[in-house]
């Protein structure tokens, strides 16, 4: 825009008269809510009226700057002045007496301040907890990778060393076998040579006798004949066919055996190398800082969102895996346990005589009055509900708690702290009162009672239970500061404990990636990542 055109606009704005007074005073102020131009005097009067004292009055020259920031009602196109809490939308004055009549309203600036505060809290949470934890985790992962690569390099050197050792052993064994074979051959050949010389001597003797006899026959000398006869008799007494024993190794069949044994040469090798290289720890623990000061109960939706409830807070918070707060909901009673259905509906059990609360995924809240005194709550595979009461009663009901049936009675208070049901109908109940986990069938009859680990260690105070993807049962032990696992073979052992930073665990939940979330009575939630299968 050229300078002359800008001056024309400025002059045009300057001469616009006041819309209220009749003195044709120049309008220098503008009310965003009323969309009216005021002179200085009328602007002051506008601020004194009770119904308009909170309106936003600006300089007319600022209209272009804020035009894009003005929120308008979606129904009437008028500037929004208040925020409807029920419908979560900005509305104009007409809406207050129209479609949104009777709804709770908040001044738009106050709502903006509230949103800004939430954004700042999210920034603070990311900067103070999430980002440093992610940086720390990155360093730990990098360190683990370096350790792994070094260990792999060392293993490669060991394998190469073993290969060379094996080759040396093979060469040495081959030489020893070959030398032994050659030595045997020489000793056997010597036997043949000795026997050959012995036979040659006898042959020579025989040939000489034959020659003597022939000479005597030709001479016909009686004395020679008589004397020769005596010697001839001596010769006949000699063995006519000398025996030549063969070396034992050359007895028929033994040579083939020796050759075959050479083919299947046995070497005293070291045990085969098995790749047992693993990262230095199969478990990786991280700490998630909850938005609530004391977080005790947890539930994770099938979409991966995490509901958290505080033991000292009348509020529920939904966060994502990055720690970002998605929803906050004020509640009337302190939560004791949370459970979420596949549909996204959330159950919130509370202390004392307060009712079980069902919060719909769309946001509606319903108090299920006939479910008072609930302490632990869980959702079964067929989307029914298991309720544990403080008095030690376990009940099964439908999603609306309209058909409640008692199926088990414990030994007293806290004897049914929490319960979960497997796909085959077995129910596992944590009994904090008598330090055991009770196994029931679908009708509530006792199948077994688990009190110790496989190596004989007694349970402390079993609390929240959870199934992993393979059907193994995990439960928090508040008294032992650990999490136990019961595998498919009914072997029970400690999975994580004090050495991993676990203190007074309360409830457990698995996210979509198979990571285990462990709550306690503090703000710190432990996230356990398993780098290898633990069962």
Image (spheres, rainbow, N blue to C red):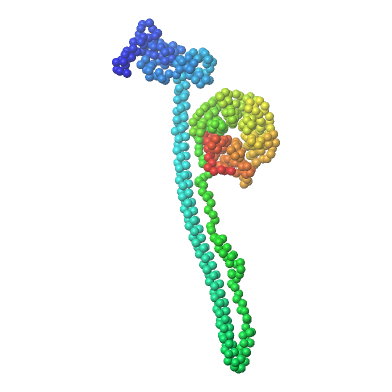
Give above or below for 440 relative to 19.
below
The N terminus sits in image quarter: top left
Where is residue 443 drawn, in percent x and y?
69, 34
Q: Quadrant of residue 253?
A: bottom right
Using the rendered image of the protein, determine whether residue 498 is visible from the camera's viewpoint: no
Give above or below for 95 relative to 485.
above
Give the number of callouts. Answer: 0
Where is residue 406 drawn, in percent x and y?
68, 31
Q: Quadrant of residue 201?
A: bottom right
> Which residue is farthest left?
4
> Which residue is farthest front?
218
Out of 440 and 159, give the one closest to the viewer. 159
Using the rendered image of the protein, determine whether residue 213 is visible from the camera's viewpoint: yes
Please tell me which residue is depicted at 42% across the width and 15% down the height of the picture. 32
Where is residue 96 drawn, in percent x and y?
50, 14
Out of 102 and 259, give the one closest to the viewer. 259
């Amino acid at each position: 825009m050229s300078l002359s055109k800008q001056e024309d606009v400025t002059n045009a704005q300057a001469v616009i008269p006041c819309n209220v007074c009749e003195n044709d005073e120049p309008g220098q102020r503008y009310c965003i809510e009323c969309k009216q131009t005021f002179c200085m005097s009328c602007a002051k009067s506008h601020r004194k009226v009770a119904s308009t004292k909170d309106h936003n009055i600006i300089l007319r020259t600022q209209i272009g700057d804020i035009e894009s920031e003005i929120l308008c009602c979606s129904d009437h196109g008028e500037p929004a002045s208040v925020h409807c809490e029920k419908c979560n939308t900005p509305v104009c004055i007409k809406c207050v007496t129209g479609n949104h009549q009777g709804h709770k309203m908040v001044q738009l600036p106050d709502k903006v301040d509230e949103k800004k505060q939430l954004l700042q809290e999210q920034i603070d949470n990311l900067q103070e907890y999430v980002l440093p934890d992610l940086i720390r985790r990155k360093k730990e992962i990098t360190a683990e990778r370096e350790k792994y690569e070094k260990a792999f390099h060392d293993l490669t050197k060991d394998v190469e060393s073993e290969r060379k050792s094996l080759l040396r052993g093979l060469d040495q064994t081959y030489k020893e076998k070959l030398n032994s074979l050659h030595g045997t051959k020489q000793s056997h050949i010597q036997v043949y040579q000795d026997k050959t010389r012995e036979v040659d001597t006898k042959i020579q003797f025989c040939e000489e006798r034959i020659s003597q006899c022939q000479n005597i026959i030709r001479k016909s000398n009686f004395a020679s004949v008589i004397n020769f006869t005596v010697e001839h008799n001596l010769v006949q007494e000699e063995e006519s066919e000398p025996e030549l024993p063969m070396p034992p190794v050359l007895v028929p069949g033994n040579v083939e055996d020796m050759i075959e044994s050479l083919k299947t040469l046995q070497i005293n090798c070291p045990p085969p190398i098995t790749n047992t290289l693993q990262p230095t720890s199969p478990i990786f623990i991280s700490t998630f800082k909850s938005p609530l000061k004391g977080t005790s109960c947890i539930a994770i939706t099938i979409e991966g969102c995490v509901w958290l409830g505080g033991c000292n807070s009348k509020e529920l918070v939904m966060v994502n895996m990055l720690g970002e707060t998605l929803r906050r909901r004020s509640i009337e009673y302190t939560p004791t346990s949370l459970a979420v259905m596949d549909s996204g509906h959330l159950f919130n059990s509370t202390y004392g005589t307060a009712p079980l609360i069902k919060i719909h995924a769309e946001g509606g809240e319903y108090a299920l009055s006939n479910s008072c005194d609930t302490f632990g709550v869980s959702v079964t595979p067929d989307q029914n509900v298991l309720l544990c009461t403080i008095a030690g009663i376990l009940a099964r009901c439908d999603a609306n708690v309209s058909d409640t049936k008692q199926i088990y009675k414990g030994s007293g208070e806290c004897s049914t702290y929490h319960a979960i049901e497997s796909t085959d109908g077995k129910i596992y109940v944590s009994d904090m009162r008598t330090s055991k986990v009770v196994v029931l069938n679908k009708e509530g009859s006792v199948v077994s009672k688990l009190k110790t680990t496989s190596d004989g260690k007694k349970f402390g105070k079993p609390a929240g239970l959870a199934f992993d993807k393979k059907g193994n049962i995990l439960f928090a032990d508040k008294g032992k500061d650990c999490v136990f696992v019961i595998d498919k073979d009914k072997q029970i052992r400690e999975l994580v404990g004090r050495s991993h930073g676990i203190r007074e665990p309360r409830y457990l939940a698995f996210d979509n990636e198979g990571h285990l979330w462990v709550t306690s009575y503090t703000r710190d939630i432990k996230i356990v990542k398993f780098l290898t299968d633990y069962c």
